[in-house]
Image (spheres, rainbow, N blue to C red):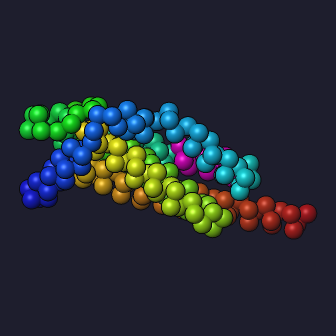
Amino acid sequence: MQEIIQKDQSIFLFLNNMGSEPFDQLWLMISATWIWIPLYVIFLYLLFKNFKLRNLVFILIFIALGVTVSDQLAGIFKTGIGRLRPCHDPAFIGIMRSVQCGGQYGFYSSHAANTFFIATFMTLLLHKKYRFLPYILFAWAIIVSYSRIYLGVHFPLDVLMGALMGFFAGGFFATLALKVIHKQNSSNSTTSVSE
């Protein structure tokens, strides 16, 4: 385990120190939530275009539940494991670039969990209609996740664990959403036939 942690720290220092001051504002923007609001509007439009209004309501409920679960789990892990963020770790003072800092603990990354949750959820719901969409979604999730290393708030393992948690949560909640939609459509078809 110590070997893995040392490797993680080495990779962090390599990636973090690749940063350059002229690009700091760009990566701060990428890491911010508000900058992605237009993208979320596009997601909402694609869902609205491809699902009935009643199904869309269920989808939005599952997205809200999934993001909440993903976020809360990250909080539990952070306090439970208690791994310091790089920017709070005295061992990294003077040898890393600290562009931004968050709470004391960083395992695992909520940003990675939430973006990978959305990427996985949207992929499972829409990949048959838009074959290119998964590439865009996962590229977005990777870029946002990398921004956390660039800014000095997460180690690569924090990000990797967050991505895995988001991926599995996205798969779980998307499967539930699709089952509810299928059941809803089946009952609507049965009602239409009986009428």
* Horizontal side, residue 169 vs residue 18: left or right: right
* Horizontal side, residue 115 vs residue 14: left or right: right
Along the line of sight, the residue nearer the viewer: 106 or 194: 106
Image quarter where the N terminus lies is bottom left
* Horizontal side, residue 25 vs residue 91: left or right: right
Along the line of sight, the residue nearer the viewer: 73 or 30: 30
- Residue 109, given in percent of the width and then of the height, sits at 32, 45
Residue at 17% x, 39% y is 96
Along the line of sight, the residue nearer the viewer: 112 or 12: 12
For the question of whether residue 54 can be seen, the reply is no
Along the line of sight, the residue nearer the viewer: 141 or 74: 141
The residue sitting at the right extreme is 195
Tell me where residue 92 sits by quadrant. Answer: top left
Image quarter where the C terminus lies is bottom right
Residue at 63% x, 67% y is 128
Residue at 57% x, 60% y is 133
Magenta region, residue range: 55-64
- Residue 26, given in percent of the width and then of the height, sits at 40, 36
Q: Is residue 166 above or below residue 95?
A: below
Tell me where residue 194 sits by quadrant. Answer: bottom right
For the question of whether residue 141 can be seen, the reply is yes
- Residue 143, given in percent of the width and then of the height, sits at 40, 49
- Residue 48, given in percent of the width and then of the height, sits at 70, 49
Q: Is residue 77 magenta?
A: no
Residue at 29% x, 34% y is 21
Decide whether the magenta segment is chiefly helix, strand or loop.
helix
Q: Is residue 60 magenta?
A: yes
